[in-house]
C-alpha cells in the first residue's frame, strides 16, 4: 500500500479587522454652565457700577480705548477674542511680555507677573486693577458667550500655546476661567510646569464642589496679591530714591 505524498498544510491566519476607536467627546458639563450664568446674575448688580467707574477712570488717566481685545486660546485649542479693561499704554510693545514669558517657560523660575516688579508700560492705577483682578470684569461677556467659565485654566496667547507639548495641551480640555486652581494656589510663586500640572489636575477632576472651593478662595487670594503688589512697589520706590 502506497502512502500519498501530500504537501504539508500551511495555516494561513486571516488579518484581524482594524477597528478605529472614536476619541472621547469632550463637552462642558451642564452644571458648569448653570453655575456660570447663576453667578453672573447674582453679581451683576455689584459689578455693573464698578465696571462703569473703572471705565471712567481709564478714560481720565490715559488716552485710548477702555477695553483691550486680544486673541487667546481656549477650549480644545480654539481661538477667541478675550476682553479686559485696558491697563497698558496704547503703544505698549507686546514683544516685551512675549520675551519675558518665553524665558519663564524655559526655566524653573516662579511665574511672577511683570507688574509686580513695576512695569513702566502700565497706565496710572493699572497695577491696582491687574493685581485686584478688576481688569477682568469684561470677561463676564466671554462667559456669557460660552467662550470662558468662571473657573478654569487661564486662557493663553497663541505664541504661548505654540510652546506647549502635546501632553501639556490637556489643560485646554476645559473652558478657560476667570479664576482657577493655579490662580488661588500661589500663581506668582509657581513655575510654568507646576502651573500646567495644576491645570491638568483640575481638568481631570473638576466638580461642582471644587469650583465652589476655588471661588471661595479667590477673594482672599486677590486681596493678598493686591497687598503684596503694593508692598513690593513701595519697597522698589524707596530703593530707587535711596540709590538716587
Image (tube, rainbow, N blue to C red):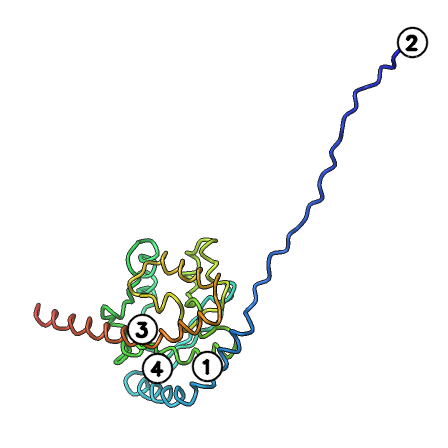
- Quick one: SS at disc 3? helix
Contact (CB < 8 A) between labels 4 and 3? no
Quadrant in which the C terminus appears = bottom left
Q: Earlier in the sequence, mark 2 or mark 1?
A: 2
Are discs 3 and 1 less than 8 Å apart at CB?
Answer: no
Q: Nearer the viewer, residue 222 or 164?
A: 222
Q: Which residue is mark 2?
A: 1
**Alpha-carbon distance for marks 3 and 1?**
19 Å
Nearer the observer, 39 or 87: 39
Question: At which x and y percent is residue 232?
Answer: 20, 71
Mark-to-mark CA distance, 4 and 3: 31 Å
CA–CA distance between discs 2 and 1?
95 Å
Task: Measure the C-alpha gap from mark 4 to mark 2.
Answer: 108 Å
Q: Which residue is mark 1?
A: 39
Q: Is residue 5 above or below residue 227?
A: above
Q: Residues within 10 Å of mark 2 (few under 14, many from 20)?
A: few
Callout 2 touching callout 3 (CB < 8 Å): no
Q: CA distance from mark 1 to mark 4?
A: 31 Å
In terms of sequence position, does the residue under pointer 1 or pointer 4 come before the other? 1
* Extreme residue toward the front, this view: 209
Secondary structure beneath label 2: loop
The residue labelled by disc 3 is 221
> In percent of the image, x 60 and y 62: which residue is there?
25
Q: Quick check: marks 4 and 2 in contact, CB under 8 Å?
A: no
User: Residue at the spot x=34%, y=62% of the render?
Assistant: 98
Q: Is residue 8 left or right of residue 76?
A: right
Screen quadrant of the N terminus: top right
The residue identified by callout 4 is 64
Amino acid at each position: 500500500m502506497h502512502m500519498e505524498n501530500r504537501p504539508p498544510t500551511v495555516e494561513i491566519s486571516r488579518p484581524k479587522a482594524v477597528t478605529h476607536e472614536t476619541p472621547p467627546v469632550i463637552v462642558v458639563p451642564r452644571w458648569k454652565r448653570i453655575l456660570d450664568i447663576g453667578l453672573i446674575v447674582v453679581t451683576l448688580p455689584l459689578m455693573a457700577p464698578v465696571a462703569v467707574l473703572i471705565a471712567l477712570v481709564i478714560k481720565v488717566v490715559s488716552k485710548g480705548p477702555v477695553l483691550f481685545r486680544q486673541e487667546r486660546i481656549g477650549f480644545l485649542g480654539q481661538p477667541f477674542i478675550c476682553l479686559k479693561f485696558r491697563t497698558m499704554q496704547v503703544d505698549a510693545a507686546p514683544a516685551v511680555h512675549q520675551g519675558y514669558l518665553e524665558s519663564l517657560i524655559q526655566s524653573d523660575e516662579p511665574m511672577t507677573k511683570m507688574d509686580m516688579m513695576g512695569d513702566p508700560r502700565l497706565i496710572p492705577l493699572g497695577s491696582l486693577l491687574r493685581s485686584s483682578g478688576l481688569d477682568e470684569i469684561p470677561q463676564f461677556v466671554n462667559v456669557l458667550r460660552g467662550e470662558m467659565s468662571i473657573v478654569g485654566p487661564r486662557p493663553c496667547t497663541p505664541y504661548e500655546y505654540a510652546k506647549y507639548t502635546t501632553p501639556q495641551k490637556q489643560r485646554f480640555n476645559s473652558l478657560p476661567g476667570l479664576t482657577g486652581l493655579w490662580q488661588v494656589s500661589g500663581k506668582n510663586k509657581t513655575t510654568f510646569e507646576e502651573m500646567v500640572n495644576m491645570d491638568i489636575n483640575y481638568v481631570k477632576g473638576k466638580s461642582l464642589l471644587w469650583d465652589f472651593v476655588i471661588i471661595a478662595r479667590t477673594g482672599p487670594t486677590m486681596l493678598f496679591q493686591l497687598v503684596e503688589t503694593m508692598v513690593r512697589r513701595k519697597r522698589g520706590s524707596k530703593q530707587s530714591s535711596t540709590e538716587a
